[in-house]
Structure formats: structure tokens, C-alpha cells
Image (tube, rainbow, N blue to C red):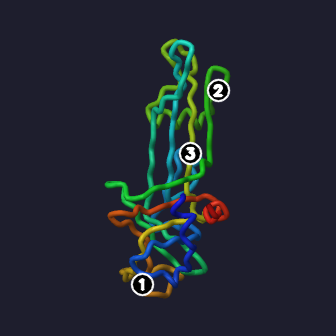
Amino acid sequence: MRTLKKLPSSGISGIRTNQLTKVTGKALHVEEPLVAPFSKRKCIFYRIKIEEKRHTGKSSHWATLVKDERFQPFFIERNGEYVIVNPSRNPINYKAHLVIDKKTSSGFFKESTPEFEQLLKEYNVRSKGFLGFKKSIRYQEAIIEIGEEVTVAGIAKWKNLNEPIEGYSYSKIASLENSEKQKIIITDLPKEKVNKRL
């Protein structure tokens, strides 16, 4: 986030090759969108975490049972111009700071919804203990929804388009990529927070 705050925002047409560049615009899918596990919203990036509250003597802590993160290549659209972002998971070449969009939980005094039970089942998480009592389980989900405003920074490159993009009349497109020393930075924090001076 410190790196993002220092960078000036760039218009897409003025992007210069091999420069670290920050672009803010709407996230649009390149392929069939992902579907977030709990909220079922269409997105290009989601990150979830499922935790269980465990007790040791008089103290307690939240143990992580599941961490899952999925993404796909996506466009950033700004004033009718496009940039493509294609982060790799193996090896991980990006850093993402996402706003948590959805939370839910269940426990001894709180029944879980059928939707939450189905989610836990999909991730092989049992909501009840050996004696049949409800476990204290919480869930959080952060996504980049289709059409949501995002800010991405990366090393800029210009590439030839093999296939045309609907509504885009140019033969080249800018891309934001990583380098050996610089990872792609992705956030859906509001623009005012991203651009706030240090």
C-alpha cells in the first residue's frame, strides 16, 4: 500500500513501457467469471478463510481450517481504454489487499444457515463436535466483483492483440506485469484511500 500511495495514477493511453505504473478502473472478466463460494457473486478474484474457535485451558484462539484464493486474468477499463492483468499463482507474483465483503459465523448459541452449512460441507468442515454440539466457526470472504473499481500497479508492457476485444478498436493493449524485483499490486480499497498522501 505504501508503494501504491507513492505512485501517480496513469491514464492508459500514456502508459510507458517498462515503467512501474498505477491504473484505477473497472475490473472486467476476460473469461467466464469465478463465483464466490458463499455470496455466489461473479468475480475475477476471491479470497476466503474459515476459522474455528478452540479452547486451551482458560485461553482460546481462532485456528485456521481453510484458506482458499482463486483469480483469473482480468481487464481494467478506464474511459473506454483497457489494460490486462494476468497474475500468476505459481510462483505467486502479486500482492493483494482486498476489502472483506462478507462475514458469517455459527456456534453454540447461533444456528448456521443452510447456505453456510453447504459451504462448510464443500470444504469438508464439520460444524458439530463429537457430542453433537455446534462448533464456533467463522467465515470471511473478500472478492473483486465484476465491474468493481480496482487499483493495480505493475510493470507496463504493450502487446499485440491476437483476438479483438468487443468495443476496443486498437490492435495493441497495455498489460501490467511483474518483474524480478516488483510484484503486481492489486487492491479494491476506495480510490481516496489508495491516493491518500503518506
On the image, numbered disc 1 is attached to which residue? 172
Q: Nearer the viewer, residue 79 or 186?
A: 186
Q: Amino acid at mark 3?
A: Glu
The answer to which of marks 3 and 1 sits earlier in the sequence is 3
The answer to which of marks 2 and 1 sits earlier in the sequence is 2
On the image, numbered disc 3 is attached to which residue? 141
Contact flag, marks 2 and 1 (Cβ < 8 Å): no
Give the residue at x 52% y 21%.
Answer: 54
Give the residue at x 55% y 21%.
Answer: 60
On the image, numbered disc 2 is attached to which residue? 111
Residue 143, relative to residue 60: is it above or below?
A: below
Residue 134, relative to residue 68: is it above or below?
A: above
Q: Position of residue 146 (x, y in %)?
A: 57, 62
**Quarter of the figure with the C terminus:** bottom right
For label 2, the SS is: loop
As measured in the structure, the alpha-carbon distance from the residue carrying label 3 to the one carrying label 1 is 35 Å
